[in-house]
Image (cartoon, grey):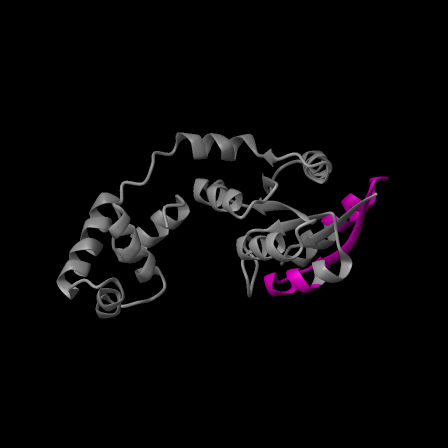
Amino acid sequence: MIRVMLAEDVRILRETLTAVLELEDDLAVVAAVGRGDEVLATATEFRPDVVVLDIDLPEMDGLTAARLLRDRVPDCRTLMLTGMARPGYLRRALAAEASGFLLKHSPPDELIEAIRKVAAGERVVDPQLALAALSTAGSPLSPREADVLRLAATGAEPDEIAERLSLTRGTVRNYLSTTVMKLNARNRVDAIRIATDEGWL
């Protein structure tokens, strides 16, 4: 019997997934949570074989939860679900050593089969996501530009970024302007979004 835990914030989807998985003779849903900050404690208590994690959870995102599970409940495998085919998500999920990555609109039988494969030690990646990741070019940002944009993404202002990276305020502003141009972004916030979606930060 494969012990499954669900982490999905939309209640109707969480309950529907539970009902669908419980129809399978070899699957048992041992726990279900709606927030990311509940994942680790619940997995530690119930010891599932596979945790099906929504990537966009409140309080703590699914990727952060996956990294915590990898470090603290290493016998547990993770299968990530996302509503959007963003290559950056796939790269970050693989970096967190997630065992699988599927789109939320995948047919139920694909999810069930993915859970079985992940439980058996295989890696499962939605073909659309894999293709999107392979067709995306590498980051156009230099390492220093990425450092500056990464700090800007945390809400740091140019003065703080300059101090932390031992740069002048003018140099930081130049880097931020360059990243906006290189990414064809509307502004700094848009540049952060683009770079994050592509997995460049």
Image position, residue 108 (x, y; %): 70, 38
- The structure residue drawn at horizontal position 34% and vertical position 34%, both measured from the top left corner, is 137
Quadrant location of residue 122?
Answer: top right
> From the viewer's perspective, is 166 left or right of 139?
left
Lateral position of residue 47 relative to residue 147, left or right: right
Residue drawn where x is 75% and y is 55% of the image: 47
Q: Is residue 145 above or below residue 152?
A: above
Magenta span contains residue 143: no
**Res. 162 image quadrant:** bottom left
Q: x, y percentage for residue 50? A: 70, 47
| Camera-side residue of 6 and 98 | 98
Residue 5 horizontal/vertical position (percent): 72, 52
**Image quarter in which the N terminus is found:** top right
Instruction: Tell me: 174 left or right of 129.
Output: left
Residue furthest toward the right?
Answer: 25
Task: Please state the extent of the stretch shown in magenta in the rendering.
Answer: 17-41
Q: Residue 84 placed where, x, y %?
A: 50, 44
Choose between 30 and 48: the one closer to the eye: 48
Q: Residue at x 49, y 40 (%)?
A: 85
Tell me if 5 is positioned left or right of 10 in this view.
right
Foreground pick, 195 / 170: 170
How many numbered discs, if any? Answer: 0
**In the image, residue 30 lies in the stretch drawn in magenta:** yes
